[in-house]
Amino acid sequence: MSNQAIIILMSAVLFLATFVIIWVSTVANESRERIVMGVHQGVPISIKHRWMIFNDWVAFKFMPALVLLIVSLAFLYVGQSVGDPKVGLISFLCGGTFAGAALFIVVLGISDMLFILSALRKDKRN
């Protein structure tokens, strides 16, 4: 594969992953608001249902971090196996960016999870 094709492929993956992560984050944030507020489209949600939504929220919040780590490892592998040092540098930078984003998602996810659990434990509604 030519260097230009590798760079185009890495750019496409970076572009696609960015939009997928933004979409998943939006879904997770909407779920977080439903859980914390206890309301969906103006209708109150029972505490049991909010716990079920929380289980789905965990997957939406933390699975993107796992995907980003896998993609990051793939970029690092490409960076090691490609012959051109400039393409390797670009690959390492993309891999580092994905790894940093994964770490950021995990830190924010833990913060959100603590907030959600606090809100669920304080609410005694059925």
Image: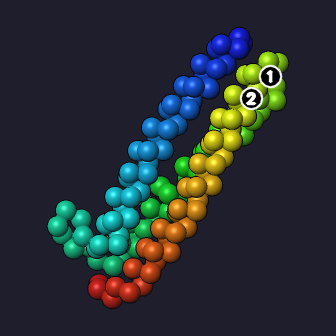
Residue 67 placement (x, y as % from top left): 60, 45
- The numbered mark at residue 121 is none
**Visible in this render: residue 59?**
no
Looking at the rendered structure, the secondary structure element under dot 2 is helix
Q: Amino acid at mark 1?
A: Pro
**Vertical order, 69 against 90 (above or below):** below
Q: Quadrant of the C terminus?
A: bottom left
Quadrant position of residue 35 = bottom left
Residue 56 placement (x, y as % from top left): 44, 61
Q: Along the horizontal axis of the image, is 99 left or right of 112? A: right
Quadrant position of residue 89 = top right
Q: In this orientation, which residue lies closer to the viewer: 10 or 43?
A: 10
Residue 71 placement (x, y as % from top left): 65, 38
Q: Residues within 10 Å of mark 2 (few under 14, many from 20)?
A: some
Residue at mark 1 to residue at mark 2: CA–CA distance: 6 Å
Q: Along the horizontal axis of the image, is 14 left or right of 19? A: right
Q: Which residue is mark 1?
A: 85
Q: In this orientation, which residue lies closer to the viewer: 115 or 120?
A: 115
Quadrant position of residue 1 = top right
Residue 64 placement (x, y as % from top left): 54, 49
Q: Amino acid at mark 2?
A: Leu
Q: Tell me whether the residue at label 1 lies in contact with that at label 2, contact meaning CB atoms closer than 8 angstroms.
A: yes
Residue at x 65% of width, y 13% of height:
4
Looking at the rendered structure, the secondary structure element under dot 1 is helix
Residue at x 71% of width, y 14% of height:
3
Q: Which residue is mark 2?
A: 89
